[in-house]
Image: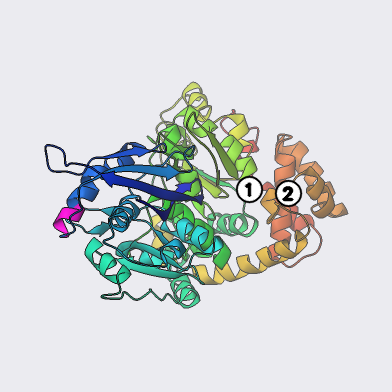
Amino acid sequence: MFTQIHSAVVNGLKALRVMVEINASPAKHDALGETPFFMVGLPDNAVKESRQRVQSALINSSLRLPRLNITINFAPADIRKVGSGFDLPLAIAMLTVCDLIKCPTLERMMFVGELGLDGSVRAVRGALPIAIEARSLGYDTLFVPRENEREAGVVNQLKVIGVSTLSELVDHLNGQSLLQPVEVNTREEFYQAQSDYPLDFAEVKGQERAKRAFEVAAAGGHNLLLIGSPGCGKSMMAKRIPGILPQLTLSESLETTQIYSIAGQLPENTSLIARRPFRSPHHTISDVALIGGGVNLQPGEISLAHNGVLFLDELPEFSRSALETLRQPLEDRVININRAKYSANLPCSFMLVAAMNPCPCGYYNDPTHKCSCNQGMIQRYMSKISGPLMDRIDLQIEVTPVPLEELQRSPKGESSSAIRERVAKARAVQTERFANLPGIHCNAQMGAREIERFAQPDAAGREALAMTMKKMDLSARAYERILKMARTIADLAGQEEVGFDAISEAVGYRNLDRSDWGETF
């Protein structure tokens, strides 16, 4: 007796079809009264342990198998099978080969899910990419755990049915009690959730220059570093930046949701992630947790921040090796992970926002506190951030505390929605500008050729830039960054040319390039 049930395994951001093949022949039960079966096809430990889960689930669901010797193959045999999602297709295959399920359309169905010992069906990772693969391969129906039904249900032209227990699935397949496919109004739910931002820039009093820097960074997709003493509002402002970024498109949302689905971090009862991610890992994070990888592939923080913001607070406290791993992803916006057992490419197009103190005590250049650090201590502290990494950060802003008197009398600030409207208009200009340049979507992604074509200043701007660089002794690496920012500032102002005002403002966002800053930059 032979049967074949269709399932899938996640590899990177994509799912691959897996055929669960079973061959059964008459045999005696072992000493424990269990039906012996053997697994081949590169199963990992979680898949091998499914023997106990499946057998217990069958018994507790009043589904007893006859005496059979069962051999299971997961095809294709050269792909490693990872995770507990094969429990459900394995159980269906065993019941089918024993003639306890009689369904003529099994070849058009795909199954995925973990089984509890009591026969319950539990959530798995990667339901969304599996649903996308099932549709692309022409399957009619996908059976998933009830907890994953809304996640997989966003895929149209595919019937997605959520299952709570093994018993109800068997009854459905035998036509005794039919289950209904889930219906998700993807667009309606997506656009309703987009307008909900818990934090608003209106709550930030003062810091007008810093808020303007956030607007420029958001409009051009520029990386941003805030440097200032403790309590000056660096983290408070950084947490509000998702509210001023352009809203996610449906395609961006789908790509981001796939990453969270694979990582098992999709919020409960969520079909699509509607707001741009904001990830803020602790500074003790390991290299693997930051970039992804591990024994079984797991997206790192940089991939979880895809299409959103990666916020690194207390930047010098991160390990040097962890920070250096960011250099290539910041340039390529994709991370290539190669391990002995797998290779994967994960997207990581994120906006880096970092915050740090200017010195170990935190009060260098603070107008109200005296710094207790000497120049050597300040230099060692700042040198924890390498030049190549600093070179990838466009805006470097010095933030000073807001005096108490100003906090008390300052009116409510401008709302995030008003700032986001200006940012969206500037991004629309950039989208049109780079429409014929693949891989470039915003000003921050311009290379030398694009800068020469789109960001050259007018005569007054060139003269101002040359004079300022000489006067302030700015580094050569600041030149292109200034032009990129100036292009964004001109876009925000609706100007075709990069003029004097845009250059002047952009120069002010390169605080750490001043030769007199801490005598180190």
Cα gap from disc 2 to disc 1, whole angstroms:
18 Å
In the rendered image, the vertical position of residue 91 relative to residue 159, given as above or below: above
Q: Which residue is pictured at 54% across the width and 31% down the height?
A: 324
Residue 65 image offset from top left, x and y in percent:
20, 53
Residue assigned mark 1: 509
Q: Earlier in the sequence, mark 2 or mark 1?
A: 2
- Single out the mark in the foreground, 2 or 1: 2
Residue 252 seen in the figure: yes
Residue 521 seen in the figure: no
In the rendered image, the vertical position of residue 450 relative to residue 383, given as above or below: below
Quadrant where the C terminus is found in the figure: top right
> In the depicted view, which residue is nearer to us: 391 or 515?
391
Confirm or deny contact between disc 2 and disc 1 (CB under 8 A): no
Query: In the image, 26: left or right of 356?
Result: left
Query: What colouring does the structure picture have?
Result: rainbow
Residue 284 image offset from top left, x and y in percent:
37, 34
Residue 201: say if magenta. Answer: no
Q: Amino acid at mark 2?
A: Met
Q: Which residue is pictured at 25% across the width and 43% down the height?
A: 51
Q: Which residue is pictured at 83% across the width and 48% down the height?
A: 452
Mark 2: few/some/many CA within 10 Å (<14, 14-19, 20+): many
Residue sitting farthest toward the top:
376
Q: Which residue is pictured at 70% across the width and 39% down the height?
A: 478
Residue assigned mark 2: 446
The quadrant holding residue 247 is bottom right
Does dot 1 land on a helix, a strand or a loop?
loop
Point out which mark residue 262 bears.
none
Q: Amino acid at mark 1?
A: Tyr
Range of magenta residues: 57-61
Query: In the image, 55: left or right of 150?
Result: left
> In the depicted view, which residue is nearer to us: 52 or 496?
52
